[in-house]
Image: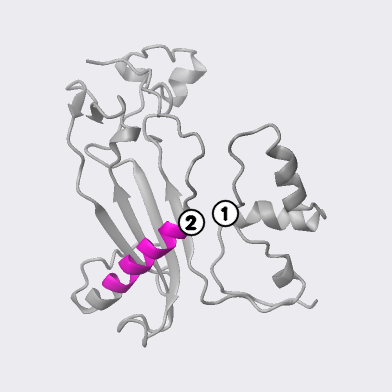
Amino acid sequence: TGPRTIDAPTSHVDLVPTLLAAAGVDVAAASSTLRESFSEVHPLPGRDLMPIVDGADADDGRAVYLMTRDNMLEGDSGASGLGRMLKRTDNPPPGLRIRLPAHTAANFEGLVLRVGEADAPGGAGQLWKLVRSFDDPSTWTEPGVRHLAANGPGGDVYRASPLDDQWELYNLDTDPAESRNRWRDPDLHELRAHLRMRLKEIRAVSIPERNEPWPYAARRSGGA
């Protein structure tokens, strides 16, 4: 096919199904084989984009769901890059630990969706991104007990109560760098409500139930 520009939303999770399709892999057969050895084999979360590469129309109305549910701010040991280079990952000293942003949730989910004016006033047929930062006690430093909320020269500070959700809203057509958070824009209250509703709907069909859930491990970082 000839060159063309596609502005429909996609996601990095589309890479795996697209590359598998390009390589001629039968995903259903591969999944069946994997189930013989693994307890957790779920449908791939992304889409095969090869039909679009071959000239098919893109799905401009697609809603792309994003989610990170992990204590990624601390790493697995709390050691900074320098601490890892020096092999000081077991209870690293303060100068070799990751400096955490204070009192910040570590879990994120988001939705990228084109919203028509008929769907929600303010949508204007443009591409919007809704981001929710949330606190999940099961991913805390000590899961279900307490979480490292801040560290630095004053020492470690822990909390045992979840933070309130924090929200961000960006117009990706006019602000692709996501430099202007529109969440508190008084003219977009109906758009916010629409996107929150769609986020709830898409989340429900995007996250599979685990067959054998396992708990998050406590971090190995030092401190009080």
Give yes or no for contact between labels 1 and 2 (Cβ–Cβ under 8 Å).
yes
Q: How many marks?
A: 2
Residue 163 placement (x, y as % from top left) = 20, 43
In the rendered structure, which amino acid carries the disc numbered 2? Ser
Q: Quadrant of residue 149?
A: top left
Residue 15 placement (x, y as % from top left) = 65, 54
Task: Residue at 38% x, 17% y: name it.
Answer: 220
Left or right: residue 153 versus residue 28 is: left
Vertical side of 198 occupied by 124: above or below: below
Task: Residue at 31% x, 28% y: name it.
Answer: 143
Task: Residue at 28% x, 35% y: name it.
Answer: 137
Residue 120 placement (x, y as % from top left) = 32, 81
Q: Residues within 10 Å of mark 1 (few under 14, many from 20)?
A: some
Q: Quadrant of residue 100?
A: top left
Residue 32 placement (x, y as % from top left) = 72, 44
Residue 145 located within the stretch drawn in magenta: no
Q: CA distance from mark 1 to mark 2?
A: 7 Å
The foreground one among 67 and 101 is 67
Q: Is residue 173 visible from the viewing direction of this image?
A: no
Q: Residues within 10 Å of mark 2 (few under 14, many from 20)?
A: some
Q: Which residues are magenta?
A: 192-205
Q: Which residue is mark 1?
A: 45
Vertical side of 87 occupied by 22: above or below: below
Q: Which residue is mark 2?
A: 206
Tag 2, which secondary structure?
helix
The foreground one among 77 and 165 is 165
